[in-house]
Amino acid sequence: MNGKIDQKDINNAAWAACDTFRGVVDPAQYKDYILVMLFVKYISDVWKDHYEVYRRQYGDDESRIRRRLERERFILPYAELKNHSTNEVEDRFLADYYSLYERRNSANVGELINIVLDAIEETNKAKLEGVFRNIDFNSEANLGRTKDRNRRLKTLLEDFNKPQLDMSPSKVSEDVIGNTYIYLIERFASDSGKKAGEFYTPHKVSELVARLASPKPGNRICDPACGSGGLLIEVSKEINDRNFALFGMESNGSTWALARMNMFLNGADSARIEWCDTLNSPALVEKDRLMKFDIVVANPPFSLDKWGAEEAKSDRFNRFWRGVPPKSKGDWAFISHMVEAALEQEGRVAVVVPHGVLFRGAAEGRIRTKMIEENILDAVVGLPGNLFPTTSIPVAILIFDRSREKGGVNQNRKDVIFVDASRDYLPGKNQNALSDEHIKKIVETVKARQSVEKYAHVATFEEIKENDFNLNISRYVDTFEEEEEIDIDAVQQEIDQLETELVEVRAKMAVMLKEIAR
């Protein structure tokens, strides 16, 4: 297969590899095995492709070829299989996919895969440290007893040997590989249902958030609840060059690993993704203070229970000075963190929230009021229901703009634009979706900051105050459709006519039945 490989072909081939585990392993688990194998196959094909280039250049000078390869983005080392009793080396081989494929019939193939992963991680610590620590290809609990496990792993290695999964740079671009990774995550999310919430935001929702965030070249961009990193990748795509820096935090270890691989496969090797609890022990810190960012985006877990309210009052970063959200709902805790992590007088925040955030009272109401009084709330966008695999409820996007603070370029902007896009979606069997046209309409409306009948309203501070700082979109955007007036006389006349016709039909039926009975 000499030509370029199509995006659709590589997507389909990668998804077909999942058949090895379907019905045996839960999708929320087998995604890790598939995505890790995709990653190993990718770096193996890149290494192999570059090896051939340097071999043509340097001939049979293996040491020179190796030295040149070791200046690449990553290094593939040699792996060693040792005897468990004597600790002597029984086998030494390049830590890549092809060495594993050659050994696919080995009785210890799961152990060999683990050895390769350990070697790759150890040699590329700066970029891959800890990425494979949560994945075990020799696990009886996940992959079955030895005979069944070996059969499945052999099949998996063979599935990735298809021509459509040749990921050499000469065959397929880096963008295509990154897109395949995101495609697989999306498909896994669909299969996993509610279990997908911890690692996936629907692509079109991510695209909308990214466009509303309005990143610019040179920006530092952060997602403090980054999941598998799709939203960060989308925001980076809004910038036409590579002049940006990506940062993220994720509390789930296996999801954090997915994010690290996602960054690598999308060419964002330098992204700093931390494994930590954002609300209780954020790791993106400089000189004992929160790092500051130009853009902060997130789709945090909705109404997170037991998020750490008990410790929030003594938060050493003073993120909750406006108030501590209730312990059973962490929405405003994430928002508070995001606002505090945004650059003063410059930073912009875009966050996906459940509608309760807009109107719930008590502590949440007090925090919401203070943020509105600070003049940092810029836009409220209501979206349709059933956009997420995790929930059917409609959600909203809140935009906070710290350039509206005193001294910022938008300090004189005092209004808030409300957009009701809840009726614009592509209906699906299990899940609805946004189209490109829907996204464009929302983004253009927010940027124009003009009221649109039954769709958008630019509200003054006084209006919001009169509504007791309740941000329920229906209070500002009137979508009521007047019902068409009914002409009672005409309806009655139609009923009379139908009754007359019914009498005639019954009479004809009676005659026909009599003829049949003769």
Image (tube, rainbow, N blue to C red):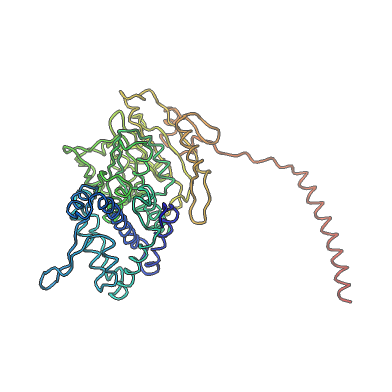
Q: Which image quadrant is residue 471 in?
A: top left
Left or right position of 157 against 82:
right
**Position of residue 372 measured from the top left corner of the image (x, y, whole percent):** 37, 32
Q: Can residue 80 be seen from the camera position used here? A: yes
Is 266 situated above or below 216? below
Residue 459 vs residue 244, the one in the foreground: 244
498 or 366, nearer to the observer? 498
Residue 239 horizontal/vertical position (percent): 36, 36
Q: Residue 253: image x %, image y %?
A: 26, 55
Q: Residue at x 76, y 47 (%)?
A: 491
Quarter of the image with the N terminus in it: bottom left
Inspect this view and state whether residue 370 appears. Answer: no
Q: Is residue 198 above or below residue 141?
A: above
Give residue 96's quadrant in the image: bottom left
Residue at the extreme left of the image, as rendered: 86
Quadrant of residue 446 within the rendered picture: top left
Task: Describe residue 91's horizontal placement relative to residue 426 as left or right.
Answer: left
- In percent of width and height, residue 461 lies at 42, 28
- For the C terminus, the image quarter is bottom right
Q: How many marks?
A: 0
